[in-house]
Image (spheres, rainbow, N blue to C red):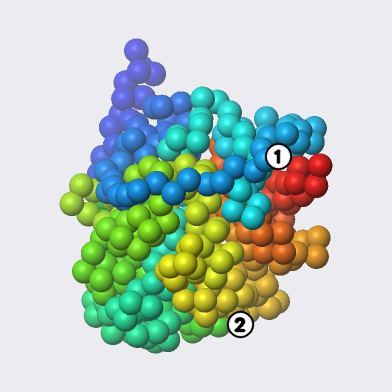
Amino acid sequence: MKKIIIFLIVFIVLITSIVISGKSWVFKAVYTTYLQGYTSAYIEDFKFFPKNIIENDKHQKWHTSANYNIAKSPEYINKVHNDLETVAYLIIVNDSIIHEQYWDGFSENSLSNSFSMSKSWISTLIGIAIKDGHIKSTSQKVCDILPQFNKGNNCQITIQDLLTMSSGLDWNESYYNPIGQTAESYYGNNLNELVFSLKSVEESGKIFRYNSACTQLLTYIIEETTNKTVSEYASEKLWKPMGAKHPALWNKDREDGDEKGFCCINSNARDFARLGKLYLNFGNWNGLQILDSIYIKKAIKPADLQSFNGGPNMNYGYQFWLTEYRNNSIYYARGLWGQYTICIPEKNMIIVRLGRKDGKELENGHFNDLFLYIDASMEIISS
């Protein structure tokens, strides 16, 4: 009986402390994860969040290669898929699907959380807004568009600083702190207040530090300059003209709130792959120039910055990850737990992998599973 009373007292104190601290969003985090059998965010958790719809229009089908699914997957990648719980693996070469696999009840029509792959979509919308004349250029100051952000040295931050994750803002991108900024941005219900409270703590445009708040500020810039939600703008400028098969969902912080631009487009492998085709064709979609090719060249080139570990930045452009591998220049969108849309221009190839776990993070900032998916794809297309 005494133990039960002590437990109840501790429980009440804990609940009271959370409420007093203003971090009541922790309750939603617990309900969404632990009470559903998970310990963190997962690819089907979108059902627990308010969301906007990215509307589609007439479907433009992918071509299917004459060699579709003829080549067998290498044994080592089958083990990787099993160990890391892959749910979708798609390979497209020359605009034709050559290989496609799904697991755990998923299919070409299943919704899955993009997590931070959405950052690359936000970057794309910024480029389109510049092309449309809503934004002057990447050198425009953030405070010119978002005056509520004008605090101290914040007024020195440019759109390019946000695109290249070099804002210098006081943000800690920690996925292991259950009450930190990243957790609050994901589970909380007031992104606006969280992001606009940030302050510059180091000179902007100098050091690459991965920072989801940068992408959320880009989201607010899109909304302010286009007078549309990012879901509406994405529908008009991307989902409809690129012929997505299904509407997508973009999670919000609350019903009357904002899309979480730093994460959380929910779609499927085939529709995620459309971003890869757009970039491989330098912004041209079947004759329609959606995005300026000059913007794309900058987006997939390492930003001239110092890396957080002291060396030159070689891995990041405008919200795209970059690497050199097997004599190929590769750029890709990446999300938590190994969500990938990988572009290999030399092969005119797109790889999409969706799943529940990722590999081991390497010293260079990439994850080892990325290179395994590339290796396997190379073997499959050469079989």
Whether tag 1 and tag 2 are in contact, CB under 8 A, the answer is: no
Residue 245 appears in the rendering: yes
| Label number found at residue 67 | 1
Measured as percent of width and height from the top left, residue 98 is found at 66, 43
Residue closer to the observer: 353 or 309:
353
Q: Residue at x 70, y 76 (%)?
A: 311
Where residue 84 appears, x then y in whole percent?
Answer: 65, 36
Quadrant the N terminus occupies: top left
Residue 357, x across and y down, in percent: 60, 39
Q: Give the number of the mark in front: 1 or 2.
A: 1
Residue type pointed to by label 1 = Asn
* Front residue of 138 and 329: 329
Classify mark 1: helix, strand or loop: loop
Residue 233 vs residue 281: left or right? left
The label number, if any, that marks residue 151 in the structure image: none
Kindly give the residue lying farthest to the left in the view shown: 256
Q: Is residue 364 above or below residue 311?
A: above
The single residue placed furthest to the top in the displayed view is 1
Instruction: Judge left or right: residue 346 versus residue 105.
Output: right
**Where on the picture, by quarter, is residue 123?**
bottom left
Q: Amino acid at mark 2?
A: Asp
Secondary structure under badge 2? Answer: loop
Query: Residue 279 sits in which quadrant?
Result: bottom right
For the residue carrying disc 1, how many other residues have a C-alpha within 10 Å: few (<14), some (14-19), or many (20+)? few
Relative side of 145 to 380, left or right: left
User: What's the CA distance linking mark 1 and mark 2?
Assistant: 42 Å
Rendering coords of residue 72 (x, y %): 76, 33
Q: Residue at x 18, y 51 (%)?
A: 256
Residue at 40%, 84% in the rendered image = 137
- Marks 1 and 2, the one that precedes in the sequence: 1
Is 202 situated above or below 363? below
Read off the residue under disc 2: 304
